[in-house]
């Protein structure tokens, strides 16, 4: 049964209240799964009235989509922090991208699985259109303009690398092998560089 909002909750800015709802939902989705979590449980955990939930989200599915978008944005920001540190070394920038994506995804894999696996099967339209793939495509295009490498199709290469690294992390997370995890960064860096014909 939902609890009443605490005194003072109404003074929170709308973005803070929305974030509180999303954070509570994410915790519950990770712990119990999306299907088993109700809107009542989310509002109780966020300490807001049920009506407040519907001010920000029309349904649990819309909330799930917002969590997916936030996941992608946060992962992308961690990738960009890593690549911003490297200026003119394009192979180094690509290696940093691959390492940041792999380690960031691995660190947040439980959230990823709770948020994204609940939405399968997905329609094919737009399935691979996401901010992380788009960012890698831009990096590959910029590197090609700088003559760092030559790629026939930057979009297909970006999708290939994204999917490959994603699958490698999935495989490692299932094995729970610490020794293998330690070599993850080196492995994905080498694979990324080889995919653009660089041995740096």
Image: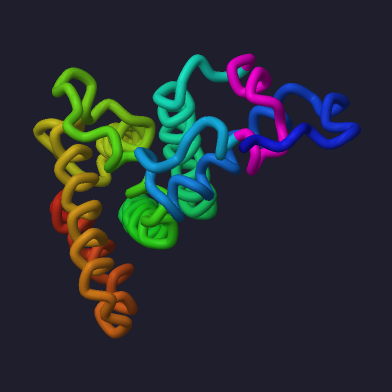
- Magenta stretch in the rendered image: 43-55
Residue 100: give x, y in percent of width and height: 41, 56
Q: Specify whether residue 87 is in view.
A: no
For residue 190: magenta?
A: no
Quarter of the image where the C terminus is located: bottom left
Residue 97 versus residue 151: which sits nearer the camera? Answer: 97
Q: Is residue 41 left or right of residue 165?
A: right
Residue sitting at the far front:
1
Q: Is residue 176 left or right of residue 87?
A: left
Protein image colouring: rainbow
Residue at 73% of width from left, 31% of height from top? Answer: 16
Q: Specify whether residue 21 is in view.
A: yes
Residue 167: give x, y in percent of width and height: 18, 55
Kindly indicate the quadrant of the structure image that contains residue 188. bottom left
In this rendering, the answer to whether 13 lies above or below 102 is: above
Residue at 43% of width from left, 61% of height from top? Answer: 107
Residue 77 versus residue 17: which sits nearer the camera? Answer: 17
Kindly indicate the quadrant of the structure image that contains residue 174. bottom left
Residue at 21% of width from left, 27% of height from top? Answer: 127
Residue 178 versus residue 44: which sits nearer the camera? Answer: 44
Q: Main secondary structure of the magenta part?
A: helix
Quarter of the image where the N terminus is located: top right
Residue 67: give x, y in percent of width and height: 47, 34
Counting every numbered tag in the picture gives 0
For residue 44: magenta?
A: yes
Kindly indicate the quadrant of the structure image that contains residue 125. top left
Q: Is residue 29 left or right of residue 53?
A: left
């Amino acid at each position: 049964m939902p609890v009443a909002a605490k005194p003072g909750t109404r003074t929170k800015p709308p973005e803070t209240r929305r974030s509180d709802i999303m954070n509570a939902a994410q915790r519950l989705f990770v712990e119990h799964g999306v299907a088993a979590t109700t809107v009542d449980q989310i509002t109780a955990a966020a300490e807001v009235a049920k009506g407040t939930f519907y001010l920000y989200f029309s349904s649990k599915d819309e909330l799930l989509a917002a969590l997916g978008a936030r996941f992608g944005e946060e992962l992308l920001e961690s990738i960009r922090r890593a690549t911003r540190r490297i200026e003119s070394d394009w192979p180094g920038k690509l290696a940093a991208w691959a390492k940041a994506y792999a380690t960031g995804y691995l660190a947040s894999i439980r959230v990823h699985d709770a948020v994204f696996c609940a939405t399968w099967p997905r329609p094919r339209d737009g399935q691979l259109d996401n901010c992380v793939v788009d960012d890698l495509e831009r990096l590959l295009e910029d590197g090609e303009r700088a003559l760092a490498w030559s790629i026939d199709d930057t979009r297909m290469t970006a999708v290939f690398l994204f999917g490959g690294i994603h699958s490698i992390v999935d495989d490692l997370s299932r094995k729970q092998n610490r020794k293998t995890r330690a070599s993850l960064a080196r492995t994905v860096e080498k694979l990324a560089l080889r995919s653009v014909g660089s041995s740096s």
